[in-house]
Image: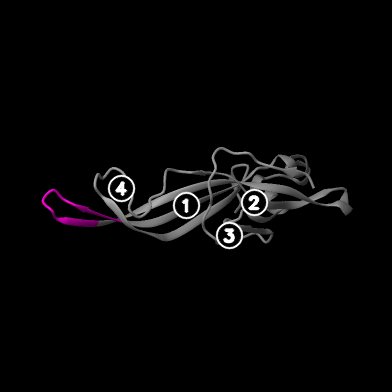
Amino acid sequence: MKKKFLSGIAAGALAFGIMASSGFAAVTFDPSTGTGFVGKGDVQSSLGFNNAHMQREANNLVFSYESVEKYEVTVEWTTGEGTKGEKTHTVEHKVSSFINSDVNYDSRKAKQYTGFNLTGLGNTIEAGTFLKVSDEYPGNSGHIVTSVNLISSTGTLYVNGVPLQ
């Protein structure tokens, strides 16, 4: 197998543990580890490649994962008159990660590619900083975060910028 390591832009960590899979039969993916398998047919369908094109391009494909986590963030503050206030905001946190991969092939069939082993998270980019309890809420001087609760998490696996669907 030819090893392909994808370098990236920034370091970080993806911190949730769900299994994501597409409607295709040969895609399994764990976004918390960046591991899984994508079948050749799923990539061909997504990119519109015929078999010959797929064989030529297999070593040049780049996998990535983008997630959007929604949180309820509650803040508290005290006005100049001493009145306490509280408000809950819905905040999105976006994370993009490159995925390291190996090309998987059947050596009995003249190295015919069969899919891609996803071998772990590469570099990660996080949009903005994430809020935690006791942080000051951005743009609201004196508004202090008192709770952060995950509402939902969604994600999409991509190959060369095209979603695997």
Amino acid at pointer 3: Ala
Amino acid at pointer 2: Gly
Work out whether mark 3 precedes mark 4 in sequence or the reverse, and give the earlier one.
3
Mark 1 packing: few (<14 Cα in 10 Å), some, or many (20+)?
A: some
Tell me the number on the disc at residue 68: 1
Q: Residue at x 71, y 53 (%)?
A: 117
Tell me the number on the disc at residue 152: none
Q: Residue at x 37, y 52 (%)?
A: 91
The magenta stretch spans residue 155: no
**Residue 84 sits in quarter:** bottom left
Marks 4 and 2 close (CB-CB < 8 Å):
no
Magenta segment range?
74-86
**SS state under label 2:** strand
Q: Nearer the viewer, mark 4 or mark 1?
A: 4
Where 17 falls versus 91 (above or below)?
A: below
Whole-percent x and y of residue 54?
Answer: 74, 44
Work out whether mark 4 precedes mark 1 in sequence or the reverse, and give the earlier one.
1
Marks 4 and 1 close (CB-CB < 8 Å):
no
Whole-percent x and y of residue 21?
Answer: 60, 60
Residue labelled with disc 4? 136
Mark 3 packing: few (<14 Cα in 10 Å), some, or many (20+)?
A: some
Q: Residue at x 33, y 49 (%)?
A: 135
Residue labelled with disc 2? 120
Compute the Cα span from label 3 to label 1.
Answer: 13 Å
Question: Does residue 20 appear to the left or right of 119 in the view shown?
Answer: left
Q: Nearer the viewer, mark 2 or mark 1?
A: 2
